[in-house]
Amino acid sequence: MLRFIVKRIGLSILTLFLVSVIVFIMTSIMPGDIAKQILGRDATPEAFEIWNKEKGFDKPLVVQYGRWISGVITGDLGTSLQYEMPVSEILGPAASKSAQLALVALLIIAPVSILGGVAAAMNRGKKVDRVLTVGGLSAAVIPEFVWAVVLILLFGVAVEAFPVYAFPEEENPNLISSVYHLILPSIALLFVLFGYISRITRAGVVEALDSDYMRTAVLKGLSRKVAVTRHVLRNALLPTIAVIATQVPYLAGGLIAIERVFNYPGFGNILLDAVIARDFPLLQTAVFLTGFVIVSFQLIADILFAVLNPRIRQRVTE
Amino acid sequence: MSATPTLELRNLEVAYTVRGIDRQVLRDVSFSIAPGEAYGLVGESGCGKSTAAFAAMRYLPRNGKITKGSIFFEGDDIVSISEAEVSRLRRSAISMVYQNPSTALNPTIRVGKQIAEVFELNGMSSDEAMTKAQEALTTVQIADPSRVMRRYVHQLSGGMAQRVVIAMALASNPRLLVMDEPTTGLDATVEAEVLDLVRELRRDTGTSVLFISHNLGVIRHMCDRVGVLYAGALVEEGATAELFDNPSHPYTVGLLRCIPRGGLHKSTDRLDTIPGTPPALGTDFSGCVFADRCALVDDKCRSQQPQMVTIAGSHVARCFHSDGAKNLPRSVENISFAPQHDAGASNFGETLLDVSHLSKVFNQDGHKVRVINDVSLRLGVGETLGLVGESGSGKTTIAKLVLGLTPPEEGGVISLDGKGLAQTLNRRDVQDVGAMQIVFQNPDQALNRRHSVTRIVARAVERLRRFSLRNAIERAHELLSGMRVESTLHSVRPVQLSGGLKQRVAIARAFAGAPQIVVCDEPTSALDVSVQAAILNLLVDLQKQDKTSFIFISHDLGVVRYISDRIAVLYLGRVVEFGTSQRVFSGPFHPYTEALLSSVPKIDGSIRKRIPLTGVVPSPSNPPSGCVLNPRCPRKQGSGYESLCESEEPNLTEVEPGHFMRCHIPVEKLKQLQN
């Protein structure tokens, strides 16, 4: 088991290294010149040169990369060009905001989607199944920002049941208020992810329901309900967990648009601003950290999967 | 006979709804099982055996329903009782064991817990249940029950998993045990052990058994009475010995004749088959269900449904011509052909394939595992070499080495017609590749389901014979017709064909390159006996016609004996016995061969004392020192050679002309012990 974990971690580090290189190259070749924006159109060529030298942009790319990545590793995330503030001070609070939104969203999406999938599987071929499957799929083809706008119009403007901003306006909002503000954005994400996760769950449950061991359980004299909870769910939910974990990256992407629409001061919003302002240090680090979160979740999913599945666990122990 | 039967099916009819139409699966089936009795159901696939078994458990597929009749358990009709009552019955009175024990157990729960679940259902605390579960494992004679308790199913061998399933079935102390093909897919030696166990448990507990199997030998061995199902109808029933010795329905007669048994050999006997194919699910019959395939059919059979007529005592048959069933005309003429050489002769025919000092080492988690150890074999022109041995003995690996699918270790030589062959397939030229082809067990997986039958065969002709497409297609039609695949079926895809026809297509494909040798890896194991007989006849015909040689792998010793000229018995990647078919099967035997042969239940009911192999097959990664068989050898003790057996590996030596054995015990001594 230990060897397995060490190996996975090693692979994750390799992935992150590749991510960092790609991120760095991509941002470096991005069009637009931040110096012009900051110093103004009328600045002299000498001023540009001094500014570039000061920020280290005159060095070869490899050196720039080396400086950046060693900074990231040692915790020095650099300074934002736009705000003239340490990147960590900007990203820190934003990341915690985004994490709150992601957590609330996940807490709504995972149980609802899994329940939907189980319900569809248990009523295979019946009306419930068809409504859930077709409905889930239809909802998923509409992008989350469209859903966000629709939800705002319906429940924020027409009915006024939920706030249209995801962030409470009061000074020190309590937990209930914070969560309440996050419900509408979470539902927008739910609509997009429900179809996918519930379908995977449904497939897993159907396979387990049709399995020989389920038949054994029923023929042992277990009632269907007990047989399902004891023998089906554990096996069926294994693949689902892995799927949910792999959906975290998508959640991260979806968050960017959602945060924009709901005007939420999270990671995604900062990221978008950084792109627009060509704020390379901020952008590079933000994208890299997003990659870090995604890879970490994949790692956690893999390890979780191994722990839950004795066959994999055994193989990795031997 | 006044006691209430444990199980009684009365006029039971079951239908499956397929595409909105009810298709009848069981037709007016009635039989009963007395307390303590073992009742067998036989018949080919699709005849309704399993449906009857699951109906007795009140467990039918979602589209299945009982349309008529009753099922009585100890006198109570269980057709209309509630689900809760059915669950109660399953918990306490009726249990089931079925095929594929490894999928019958939940992969994520330890097996001990799964057995304990049954005890918990009956109201025990979980500690008590675990103790009882371990006792249950002791009852099924599993080695080291406390360790097995903590295992997951993937850590158990097939035989052990089936013992666990049996322990679980017996945990509720049932009055009726339904066993649906419980030993199908297990090795012969393991099957024999499981059957012995079931017999012992039955003697101790007095449980009634409904035993379902396609294997007539197993049924004869296990059951007091037997019923024969065809197309969902019970066509014959009687006491086992009486029915097998005096079959009175043409279907039963045909079934028994299909099986290669006794001393039947291709050189003197052609297997009989049952012409035609079983009716499709839900066919309506105005007369006898078997009329279309019966050689005794007349107008009455087609217009009137026959009733059961008494043959003798309780032996009944549903046939107007039961008197004449015994003299049912053969559907296949028995042309015996002159053997190419005397079957018992020691000299080989002209050598075609010469394999010497073949070894294969696999790398498994950093360990070197020697799966094939110094194997040398010879195969003559137009001969069949049978490879037998338990799973893991290296049969298939040898086939792969010969075909060049995997290279042997240094020193191994494979030569065809005196010419050395390259070790791997991609270094052999087209001619060599075409010269050796293979037929697999499962034609479903071997044929490309997207291509038409003609295209599959034509493609092989094109590649191996360098024919133009046009000529290749022509040749494909010839080949398919030669395999007796009707020309109307040449343009269909494999999925539209029955198992037997698919296998004929696979054989046609193997013959595309005009091969000198065809490796047949369990080619009939997935087929019904009547289809198996037809395929074996076809292979023998092809061999006669083209002088093709076969390497024939099968776990069915009857089949191997029938088709082989020479046999190599393998154990742990070594040839332990090699000789003509007749010599190997008539003895003196190598102790391993002796044990293997004695584990096969004989269809004629004769009982050969079983020579058990103790313990389990050792891992090839850590073979025992000395003779690899010695820890399990049934003849070692008291032979006077114990210390030699344990210290030195014997050589393969010629004990009689043309008969080789790898054993320290002199053949005279073996002969003496085996009489």
Image (tube, coloured by chain):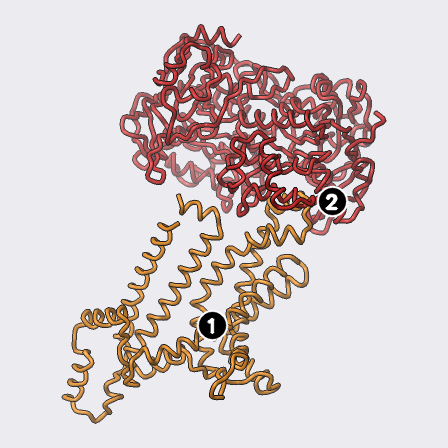
Chain colours: A orange, B red
Q: Nearer the viewer, residue B216 or B295?
A: B216
Q: Circle 2: is it few (<14), some (14-19), or many (20+) Cα within 10 Å?
A: some
Image location of residue B394, percent across then percent down:
42, 28
Q: Circle 1: is it few (<14), some (14-19), or many (20+) Cα within 10 Å?
A: many
Q: How far apart are labels 1 and 2 at the CA level?
A: 47 Å
**Mark 1 is on which residue type?**
Ala
Image location of residue B147, percent across then percent down:
50, 37
Residue occupying the point 36% across, 67% down: A291
Image location of residue A9, percent across then percent down:
34, 57
Image location of residue B555, percent across then percent down:
51, 26
Q: Which mark is residue A102?
A: 1
Label 1, secondary structure: give it: helix
Residue that extends furthest to the right in the rendered view of this protein = B2
- The correct choice, above or below, for A119 with respect to B494 in the image is below
- The correct choice, above or below, for B629 with respect to A226 in the image is above
Q: Is residue B562 visible?
A: no
**Mark 2 is on which residue type?**
Arg
Q: Which mark is residue A54?
A: none
Residue occupying the point 53% across, 25% down: B189
Q: Quadrant of the N terminus of chain B?
A: top right
Label 2, secondary structure: give it: helix
What residue is pinned by disc 2?
B88
